[in-house]
Image: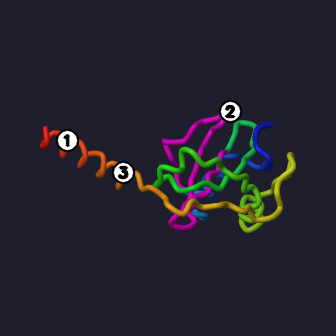
């Protein structure tokens, strides 16, 4: 068992519901865990994303993370957010069972005051390199 919640239906059906009804999308750039069959993300605002992983054993888990748009995504740890799966499964009549303890309240996440955009950082670095080339 990898995830905290086991669905009592085909995991591929759950993936389709998450994509087609709940606004998640597939991603190539996700660290894949052992037994993982899919990884999906969904932005919930400009700063945060929900990541859902589905596993071969029909289990899933969800995490709340700083958006991939920011460098801090690499350094801030994710927060378990399995409660969102319970809501989604109930809304879409997907049978499930909780197989590991989960937090039943909304997580408290501290968003850094200064988020650094990948795009802005890349532009700054390129401009700095051109400046160095121009000066020397």
Foreground disc of the pair 3, 1:
1
In the shown orientation, is residue 133 left or right of residue 21?
left
From which residue to which does the magenta span run? Answer: 25-53
* Mark 1 residue element: helix
* Mark 3 residue element: helix
The residue at which mark 3 appears reads as: 121
For the N terminus, the quadrant is: top right
Disc number placed over residue 35 in the picture, else none: 2
Residue at the front extreme, as displayed: 135
Disc number placed over residue 114 in the picture, else none: none
From the viewer's side, name the closer residue of 93 and 120. Answer: 120
Chain-order first, disc 3 or disc 1: 3
* Mark 2 residue element: loop
C-alpha span from label 2 to label 1: 47 Å
Q: Report crowding for label 2: few under 14, some 14 to 19, many 20 or more residues within 10 A (C-alpha).
A: some
Residue 13 against residue 38 in the figure, above or below:
below
Q: Residue at x 23, y 49 (%)?
A: 127
Residue 129 against residue 102 in the figure, above or below:
above
The residue at which mark 1 appears reads as: 132
């Amino acid at each position: 068992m990898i995830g905290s919640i086991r669905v009592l239906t085909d995991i591929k059906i759950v993936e389709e519901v998450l994509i087609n009804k709940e606004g998640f999308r597939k991603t190539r750039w996700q660290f894949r865990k052992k037994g993982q069959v899919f990884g999906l993300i969904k932005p919930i605002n400009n700063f945060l994303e929900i990541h859902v992983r589905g596993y071969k054993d029909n289990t899933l888990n969800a995490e709340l993370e700083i958006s991939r748009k920011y460098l801090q995504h690499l350094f801030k740890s994710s927060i378990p957010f399995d409660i969102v799966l319970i809501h989604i499964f109930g809304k879409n009549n997907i049978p499930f069972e909780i197989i590991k303890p989960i937090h039943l309240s909304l997580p408290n996440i501290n968003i850094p005051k200064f988020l650094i955009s990948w795009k802005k950082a890349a532009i700054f670095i390129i401009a700095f390199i051109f400046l160095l080339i121009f000066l020397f």
